[in-house]
Image (cartoon, rainbow, N blue to C red):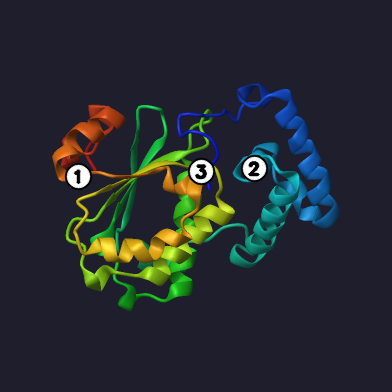
Amino acid sequence: MDCGTDENQHGHGGRGGGGDVSEWKKVAELRAVVEAQDPASKEEDDFVLRRFLRARDHNIGRASVMLLQYLSWKRGAKPHGSISYDEVRDEIAKERVQIQGFDRLGRPMVYLYGARHFPARHDLDNFKRYCVYVLDKICSRLPVEHEKFAAVIDLRGWGYSNCDIRGYVAGLNIMQSYYPERLGRVFLIHVPYMFLAAWKMVYPFIDERTRKKIVFVADRDLDATLHDAIEESQLLEEYGGKLKL
């Protein structure tokens, strides 16, 4: 999903915000290739194209395939341009996700609570729409100078009734295929031993760049790890910070 290190941040405020001349030249080449096949790509700005280009190691052929697939998916997944609150009201009510605070690199923090997810109680298509809704909300909160967010996945209380391999893979696919270069880093905390069986099944679906962003945090290292990544004023109270939920 992500190309380069998670500290490699790039601005939106103009081409001076990141990327060298040769990279922007490749963005222009990518645009020409894609617009010839799908005029809808004209609606996407250069920063979108750059993320797809970076996600495919600046290979224009591979990036164009990925971008064309995204444009096709977007028409089907978001025919009105976005997912409305009413479409995913029931999923939102489960309070599985909180977006609050920023890490030390200025990226929005997203907190996901695995024990609040029950696959038996949701339809997979609705869950996919919810994933898109959440990712769009996260991206809308990104500061001007950043393109990536960071996340904490809290698995305290996670059990087999929360296990959802299909849902996890679907969410991963959406993020990796249609929101490239958005994830900066994710911490998995309070990981129960039984989760590792599910992890082994999901792991093959995680691309190499995304794997490098994932950090399993042992309970003994939790406080130090989170405080190292997030200032106390921006860390939620439940994790030893001063930020109220």
Q: Are marks 3 and 2 in contact (CB under 8 Å)?
A: no
Please report the residue visible at 45 percent of the width from the left and 29 percent of the height from the top. Answer: 7
Please report the residue visible at 79 percent of the width from the left and 50 percent of the height from the top. Answer: 34
Decide which of 44, 88 is in the foreground and name it. Answer: 44
Decide which of 58, 235 is in the foreground and name it. Answer: 58
Q: Which numbered disc covers residue 48?
A: 2
Whether residue 52 is visible: yes
Tell me where residue 119 appears, x and y as whole percent.
Answer: 33, 73
Q: Distance between the residues labelled 1 and 2?
A: 36 Å
Residue of label 1:
218
Asked if residue 144 lies left or right of residue 33, the reply is left
Q: In this view, does 54 lie above or below 229?
A: below
Please report the residue visible at 74 percent of the width from the left and 37 percent of the height from the top. Answer: 27
Alpha-carbon neighbours of circle 3 within 10 Å: few (<14), some, or many (≥20)?
many
Q: Which mark lies nearer to you, 1 or 2? A: 1
User: Which quarter of the figure has residue 23?
Assistant: top right
Q: Which amino acid does label 1 sit on?
A: Ala
Q: Do the residues labelled 1 and 2 touch (CB within 8 Å)?
A: no
Q: Residue furthest top?
A: 16
Residue of label 3:
182
Marked residue nearer the N-terminal end (3 or 2): 2
